[in-house]
Amino acid sequence: MSREIVLDCIGEVCPVPLIKAENALKKLTVGDILIIQIDHSCAMKNIPEWAKKAGHNVEVQEPVDGEWEVIIEKMK
């Protein structure tokens, strides 16, 4: 059964959200979902790029103007 973990990185500046995302993803198993909440445009660019290069499924949503959710499904 897959888990869904939410990581609140609102107000945090690069590279902190990326480091937290990397550490959180290491603890998850294949099929788990990591949702990173961010409001820094640098992180909105870097986190999806890193996750895609690592081979994971990535989706970005903007539920509030200027805040994003990066949804990563761990694939390996």
Image: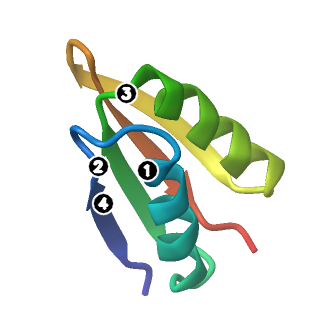
Kindly report which numbered mark, 1 or 4, lies closer to the viewer in this rendering.
1
Callout 3 touching callout 2 (CB < 8 Å): yes
At 22% from the left and 41% from the top, the residue drawn is: 10
Callout 1 touching callout 2 (CB < 8 Å): yes
At 62% from the left and 35% from the top, the residue drawn is: 46
Indicate which disc, 3 or 4, sits on the residue closer to the N terminus. 4
Residue 7, numbered circle: 4
Callout 1 touching callout 4 (CB < 8 Å): yes
Callout 3 touching callout 1 (CB < 8 Å): yes
| Of 42 and 63, the residue lying toward us | 42
Quadrant, the C terminus: bottom right
Image: 18 above or below 14: below
Indicate which disc, 1 or 2, sits on the residue closer to the N terminus. 2
On the image, numbered disc 3 is attached to which residue?
40
Indicate which disc, 1 or 4, sits on the residue closer to the N terminus. 4
* Residue type, label 4: Leu
Image: 67 above or below 33: above
Residue 37 position by quadrant: top left
Q: Rounded to the nearest whole Å, what is the CA distance between mark 1 and mark 2?
A: 6 Å
The residue carrying pointer 2 sits among few (fewer than 14), some (14 to 19) or many (20 or more) residues within 10 Å by Cα, namely some
On the image, numbered disc 2 is attached to which residue?
9
